[in-house]
Image (tube, rainbow, N blue to C red):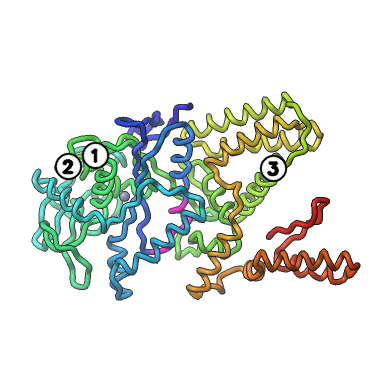
Amino acid sequence: MATIELFNTLGGKTEPLTPVGGPALRMYCCGPTVYDYGHIGNFRTFLHVDVLRRFVRQQGIPVNHVMNITDVDDKIIRNAAAAGVPIAQYTARYERAFFEDLDALNIEHPEHFSRATGCIPEMVTLIEKLAAKDIAYKTEDGSWYFRIARFPEYGKLSKKDFDGIEDGARVDVDEYEKDAARDFALWKAVKPGEQSWDTPLGTGRPGWHIECSAMATKLLGDDIDLHAGGEDLMFPHHENEIAQSESASGNPFVRHWMHVRFLLVEGRKMSKSEGNFYTLRDLLLKGYRASAIRFLLISVPYRNQMNFTFDSLTESTNAVDRLRTFHQRMLKDGFAEGLNADIAAATAKAEQDYTAALANDLNTAEARAAIFDLVRAANSAADAGSLRAENATQILRVLALFDGVFAVLEDRDAAITRAALAWAEVEGRIDEAAPELVATLSFSDADIDALVAERTQAKKTRNFARADAIRNDLLAKGILIEDSKDGVRWKRK
Ligand SMILES: [Zn+2]
């Protein structure tokens, strides 16, 4: 088992990642705020956390992983009010979409999901604890704030120097500018038209930051091995989580902090106004495959800035195809008995390089390169007739190891795209889908099987015109027919 070295934002250096206080790694990842569909930047974070949890388990360490669902915050309150619906009704569809997107991207479910609205009593208790220490204080309007002057280590995660903090200066929004070291809201007094909870603190709703502190502590205790999130959450969100949790418990809150960097799209910051803002669903409707999106988003190591381009997505599609074809080739019988020693050595090296790369701060790019080196070497040997049955067995074992983390070999792509099209239909967004995609998927597997059978029959009766017409018709809809000595096969492009 390799020791996993992971960069720790708190210490500012790479450190071994080990569970303390039990066999399982207790990890918390800030989940989605369910007010909209997730974009590819969000999923880059969740995918790299998926890579981490899969690799940690592969190395023999169980994980106890919690992800929160933020189903009450400023944006949700605002959007639900604008739509004139209760927040639970507003968030339900985006929560459902989030789970569908996780599954489409083959992201494993954490051991626990926790909705913020399900943990209000724990948030109240935490604020009461802070109030008893005079660290939380109530303002005239009935809101509660965290007094950051009482937490001298404020800024230790984001490495910001907050000298000259003005005691009592407050900020009441959940997301605010980087230089605003202000007392932040723990509990927000009810405003007209807003949903609220009656609690011993008064009538109101929680601030965003207290939600994560309360949920993490409730499910994992007040001494957590790893906390992850996107780099945008480092300040103020994670800094505030630390201040709240450590002030309440008196213990270090989290040992290891992991932050996943932002991505650029075609070299620019992704934003709606730039027209380069993509949700997972946008890409599926354009005809890109879920497996290729997963593979691309995890192939650039999590601490590197990634430049997402459509060229790289096409390249990723080809890479996944190459892996799947190689996998099929290794599965097929027909290699002569025995072992090719050179390929056996290349296989062992690939396995070693793969493990070493991921153990080195999750270097997914090197892990991927190690496996493609093996694909190249084994394909040439197979072409030359020198690959042996025992090599194929060994290679399949290493491929399974690789796929335990990268998870792209199983082909569920067409089903996922069909589900995306069905969703677009319901949402009145089908006109955003690529026309050839709609044409391809309007044929069910059974329809295609029937046409392929008809073509085979036509060829038998020497009706080649009909056989060609069927082939061309299917091709126009993106369905390829391959005649081989084992019979006729088809696949969607
Ligand atoms: Zn959080």
- For this view, does 202 lie left or right of residue 407? left
* Residue type marked 2: Ala
- For this view, does 240 lie left or right of residue 130? right
Q: Residue at x 8, y 61 (%)?
A: 140
| Label 2 residue SS | helix
Circle on res. 222: 1
Q: How far apart are marks 3 and 1 (CA)?
A: 47 Å
Depth check, front residue: 449 or 254: 449
Between disc 2 and disc 3, the foreground one is: 3
Classify 236 as above or below 492: above
| Label 1 residue SS | loop
Circle on res. 248: 2
**Can see residue 239?**
no
User: Which residue was labeled with disc 3?
Assistant: 326
Q: How far apart are marks 2 and 3 (CA)?
A: 55 Å
Residue 40 belongs to the span the image colors magenta: yes
Q: Please rate how many residues cluster around mark 1, counting C-alpha atoms within 10 Å: few if below 14, some from 14 to 19, many from 20.
A: many
Q: Distance between the residues labelled 1 and 2?
A: 9 Å
* Residue type marked 1: Asp
Give yes or no for contact between labels 3 and 1 (Cβ–Cβ under 8 Å).
no
* Residue type marked 3: Phe
User: What range is drawn magenta here?
Assistant: 36-43
Q: Earlier in the sequence, mark 2 or mark 3?
A: 2
Instruction: Give coordinates of residue 350: x percent, y percent.
Output: 62, 31
Give yes or no for contact between labels 1 and 2 (Cβ–Cβ under 8 Å).
yes
